[in-house]
Image: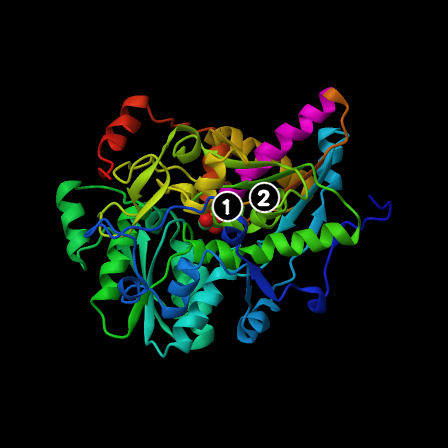
Amino acid sequence: MKEDIPYKIYLSEEEMPTQWYNVRADMKKKPEPLLNPQTGKPFTHAELEPIFCKELVAQELDDQTKWFDIPEEVLNFYKMFRPSPLVHAKFLEKALDTPAKIFYKFEGNNTSGSHKLNSAIAQAYYAKKQGLKGVTTETGAGQWGTALSMACQHFGLDLKVYMVKCSYEQKPFRREVIRTFGASIVPSPSDTTEVGRKILAEHPGTTGSLGCAISEAVEAAVNNEGYRYELGSVLNQVLLHQTIIGLETQKALQKYNIKPDILIACTGGGSNLGGFATPFLGEMLRGEANYKIIGAEPASCPSFTRGKFAYDYCDTGMICPLAKMYTVGSQFIPSASHAGGLRFHGMSPVLSELYHQGLFEARAYEQTAIFEAAEIFARAEGTLPAPESSHAIRAAIDEALKCKETGEEKVIVFNLSGTGYFDLYAYKAFNDGTMGDYVPTDEEINTALERLPKI
Ligand SMILES: *Cc1c(COP(=O)(O)O)cnc(C)c1O
């Protein structure tokens, strides 16, 4: 490691990667294909194209092409907020009194406040290129809806957002940002779709879930001429776009000859962990390097640590493709935790396969432990982290504290996926001491897992 590492390592615009990396090309055992729930057979291009944009379907189903060129229009948009800095967390190291070296890649430096804009702009670009009128989507905590509203506005596309009801009520300000960028937004489940009406009848008073909002958005896309559906996580295409994070991180580390030991990101559907870590996992798959990689998830929705590796629906309404993934069951409705972006029952099939092969580990954290980490980080580094990202911070702090005990100078790099300026009700609950921890019982998880489709 060089001695003169600046507090923030910036790459220049010229140094920004111009291709996305597809880790599936380096995997000997590939992730299992998406299955059509009607036929039980792998989805074909023709079957997926009524739902997703054509080029995105091609990316989704391609497990051979290692590098995809980033279109120039997307690169130009990226330059509004990229390359993002890799920060040497000197003040956090000092606060923890650890010999470990801690770095974080900061993805919150745009109005949407998270990494989601990296895929949103790519997805909007392909919709525009195809000549569509608009797209539909769901949003949980609101970050994806915000990101996609910015992206659709940039390309002049209409956007209909289905927002998980508890977030719609908890986060009125997100809603207004989305409307400012010109999208329309309804709380989900809503009575505007057949599947929404069905869920409302079965679970009156439900606060909704990502899975249920996805069902509604897909129905709205398929029933509206000139529309397609776009999803902010889980899918292979989303992980692909997000690799801009990991590729920039690799370059910035190389620039100062920093060799990471431990890489950490939080996991909802897996897009920021996938985007951050798959370039490094690729090195491991090719036998070039070895890292300890950790996915940090909420104990309230523990897909990796307590879920099953099985085919499951991606949505509560059971109309979406079946994916082989770590899941706590599509019928599992997680508690209304403050890390809304991590309340998805399943996990990226790519990451699920890599986890199954033992290439990385996962840890689950309870809510108050997350906010304790968020507070330590905010006070030391001066940035208010998103509750989701604070799962990664928790894991990084725990690893740094282990180094303090052993005296090891490990290099820890984590992804700070976003900021928490729209999560102040959550911070209020923490500061007031009224925040609870909710961990599902085995029985709750088993009940949902019993309803996994029989494949
Ligand atoms: C959405 C979101 C996540 C979780 O989604 P992944 O697809 O797992 O990355 C994490 N952090 C932030 C800030 C988010 O907005």
Report the side of 361 relative to 381 (left or right): left
Which residue shows up at 22% across the image and 70% down it? 224
Report the side of 279 relative to 132 (left or right): right
Name the spot of residue 344 as percent of width and height, x first.
37, 43
The residue tagged 2 is 285
Does residue 227 sit above or below 100 in this rendering? below
Name the spot of residue 302 as percent of width and height, x first.
41, 32
Is residue 5 at least partly visible in the picture?
A: yes
> Can you tell which mark lies on residue 28?
1
Is residue 112 at least partly visible in the picture?
A: no
> Can you tell which mark lies on residue 147?
none
**Does the magenta run of residues contain 331?**
no
Does residue 46 sit above or below 41 in this rendering? below
Q: Is mark 2 within 8 Å of ligand 1?
A: no
Number of the front mark, 2 or 1: 1
The amino acid type, in three-letter code, at marker 1 is Lys
Using the numbered discs, state the Cα–Cα distance from disc 2 to disc 1 in whole angstroms.
9 Å
Name the spot of residue 450 as percent of width and height, x first.
23, 30
Q: Earlier in the sequence, mark 2 or mark 1?
A: 1
Kindly indicate the quadrant of the structure image that contains residue 346. Answer: top left
Which residue shows up at 61% across the image and 64% down it? 81
The amino acid type, in three-letter code, at marker 2 is Leu
Magenta part of the chain = 388-405
Q: Residues within 10 Å of mark 2 (few under 14, many from 20)?
A: some
- Is 298 or 34 nearer to us in this picture? 34
**Does the magenta run of residues contain 396?**
yes
Main secondary structure found in the magenta portion: helix
Label 1 secondary element: loop
Q: Residues within 10 Å of mark 1 (few under 14, many from 20)?
A: few
Report the side of 388 relative to 289 (left or right): left
Tags 2 and 1 in contact by the CB under 8 Å rule? yes
